[in-house]
Image (tube, helix red, strand yellow):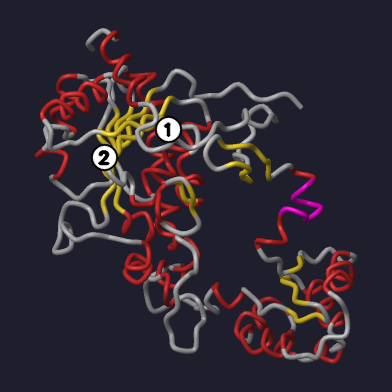
Amino acid sequence: MTEATQPLAGIKVVEFSTMITASLATMMFAQQGADVIKVEPPGIGDPMRWLGSQKAGISGLFHNCNQAKRSITLDLKSAEDLAHARQLCLQADVVIHNYRPGVMDRLGLGSDALRQEKPKLIYCAITGFGHEGPLADRPAYDHVMQAMSGFMTLQGHPAGFAYVKTLICDKLTAYTAAQAITAALFAREHTGRGQHIDLSMLESCIAFLWPDGGMHLTLQGEDVAHGAPFADYYQLPLRSTDGAIAYAAMTDAHWGAVFDIVGRADLKTEEKYKGMANRSVHMAELAAIIAGEKPNLSSAEMVAGLAAQDVPAAPCLSLEDLPANQQVLAMGIFEQSDHPLLGPVRHVTPPARFGGQKLAHCVPSPALGEHNADILAELATLPQP
């Protein structure tokens, strides 16, 4: 299959950010063909460069959020560098940052100032808690936002609170930002005008959780018939002789197959487990009963047995298992490349296929300030907006 044409080719994005929210959003644009210039402070650059596994000043985390970008180091306390930053912004289609409210305005790089000079500019400001309220000026990190938005109450931990052990709030905010900016680019095609986008982590996280996590709070009034929280439908994994599997039994036929696979056909006659309405009320106890059965089949045997009855099921895999998994291999989800500084690197390919085709191979993440000379040379030759 040939590589897809990159749909955002010709779009220029300037990113002022640390950590993940803006970085991941703009990497999606870079993978789709945009020219993304990441502005970093001299010295250590984006602190994400130094978190976790790393070498040569590039961590695995930084690489996974910054592929295909160009890096320039600018000291925004320097008048000369600040002038370069402003010039970059006025040459861009999109400016994005995740600084606290007021920071970019004080630098003269705020939305109003830039868009007054360049009305076609799309400006996206990502904050933790928005611009109003008692927390507006507070810093926000993923695990703090998990607590504030309700994520920690949904994990089923005996203590009542538990983290999702991935940077879920950062990443879902990045996806929200990418969608909003793409919508603004589309609108600009029709109106010829850019716009300002305000986006907070708190709003993004609550909006993400609400469709299922807040379904019991959506319908108001005394006449609402409440079922089990949707989290209860995440049945406990079934232990196998060599691990565990996950399953999603939704119909009577599905549950009959599950009862058979664990050797509990007797549960088919239990009235409280018949029909979706009854199971909804008793879902937690039913899932616990099933999960407590002693395993007598391997994961592969259990998945095959359930698949024969069209029950969605899969083995519980570790991240280390994924590159060799037959389904993952068939889909071409991973690719290998040689990074000029990092050596061999494993990438996840961009998930969106355009016209059924995979996007072009992504170029490496940049070293700190790697493109200073090139970008400054371009600024010197480009016409002013």
Q: Quadrant of the C terminus?
A: top left
Give the image location of residue 55, x and y in percent.
49, 50
Q: CA distance from mark 1 to mark 2?
A: 30 Å
Task: Give the residue at x 26% y 40%.
Answer: 42
The answer to whether residue 233 is above or below residue 8 is below
Name which residue type carries label 2: Pro
- Side of 266 relative to 153 (left or right): right
The quadrant holding residue 144 is bottom left
Which numbered tag is attached to residue 54? none
| Label 2 crowd (10 A; few <14 / some 14-19 / many >=20) | some
Give the image location of residue 85, x and y in percent.
22, 28
Q: Earlier in the sequence, mark 1 or mark 2?
A: 2
Give the image location of residue 255, x and y in percent.
78, 77
Name which residue type carries label 1: Thr
Q: Which residue is mark 1?
A: 182
Start-end of magenta stretch: 323-329
The quadrant holding residue 259 is bottom right
Task: Give the residue at x 26% y 7%.
Answer: 383
Q: Which residue is mark 2?
A: 42
Q: Decide whether residue 208 is among the magenta residues.
A: no
Which element carries disc 2, helix, strand or loop? loop
- Side of 342 relative to 307 (left or right): left
The answer to whether residue 265 is above or below residue 121 is below
Q: Quadrant of the N terminus?
A: top right
- Side of 201 relative to 227 (left or right): left
